[in-house]
Image (tube, helix red, strand yellow):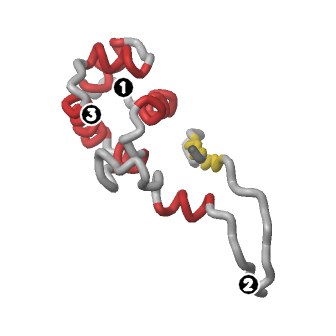
């Protein structure tokens, strides 16, 4: 994630929702100073911060927010991401063409080499 580009997208969210940094912080439930520190580049966004944005604003796509991929605002019927949707889809046929019925995927957790993690959940 490029921090300067993330800051640009965060500012775009503020403009789109017509919120000040303080009111945005209140809306997603973080300290006002954390928004200020992010916007100045002092701090990097935490996973908790990103998840609070995604939980509060359904039009924000994870990949758009983190990497600038996709569009904002996203269509509410549009999946979170094609890659995630394909991972979460229940397979209909196996390679041997037998019917396979397996439980659907509820949550995917990616563990990164730097010790951080990303959680993707359906819904």
The image quarter in which residue 20 lies: top left
38 vs 24, nearest the viewer: 24
Chain-order first, disc 3 or disc 2 = 3
On-image quarter of the C terminus: top right
What percent of the width, then of the height, locates residue 74? Answer: 34, 49
The answer to whether one can see residue 6 in this image is: yes
Instruction: Answer few, some or many: residues within 10 Å of disc 1's Cα (few below 14, many 20 plus, some between 14 and 19).
Output: few
The answer to whether one can see residue 46 in this image is: no
Residue drawn at x 60%, y 45% as measured from the top left: 121
On-image quarter of the N terminus: top left
Above or below — where is 94 with respect to 45?
Answer: below
Instruction: Answer few, some or many: residues within 10 Å of disc 2's Cα (few below 14, many 20 plus, some between 14 and 19).
Output: few
Residue drawn at x 34%, y 12% as measured from the top left: 32
Asked if marks 1 and 2 touch (Cβ < 8 Å), the reply is no
Left or right, residue 121 beside residue 59: right
Label 3, secondary structure: give it: helix
Left or right, residue 23 beside residue 103: left
Residue 43: which disc? 1
**Number of marks in the rendered image:** 3
Residue placed under numbered mark 2 in the picture: 95
Question: CA separation, marks 1 and 3?
Answer: 18 Å
Label 1, secondary structure: give it: loop
Query: Nearer the observer, disc 1 or disc 2?
Result: 2
Question: CA separation, marks 1 and 2?
Answer: 48 Å
Query: Nearer the observer, disc 1 or disc 3?
Result: 3
Instruction: Answer few, some or many: residues within 10 Å of disc 3's Cα (few below 14, many 20 plus, some between 14 and 19).
Output: some
What percent of the width, then of the height, locates residue 26? Answer: 37, 14
Residue drawn at x 30%, y 45% as measured from the top left: 73
Residue placed under numbered mark 3 in the picture: 13
Chain-order first, disc 1 or disc 3 = 3
What percent of the width, then of the height, locates residue 118? Answer: 56, 43
């Amino acid at each position: 994630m490029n921090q300067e580009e993330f800051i640009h997208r965060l500012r775009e969210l503020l403009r789109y929702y017509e919120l000040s940094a303080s009111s945005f912080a209140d809306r997603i439930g973080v300290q006002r100073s954390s928004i200020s520190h992010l916007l100045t580049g002092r701090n990097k966004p935490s996973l908790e911060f990103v998840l609070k944005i995604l939980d509060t604003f359904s039009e924000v796509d994870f990949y758009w927010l983190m990497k600038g991929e996709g569009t904002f605002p996203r269509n509410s019927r549009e999946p979170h991401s094609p890659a995630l949707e394909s991972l979460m889809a229940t397979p209909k046929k196996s390679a041997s063409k037998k019917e396979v019925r397996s439980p659907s995927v509820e949550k995917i957790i990616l563990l990164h080499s730097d010790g951080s993690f990303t959680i993707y959940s359906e819904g």
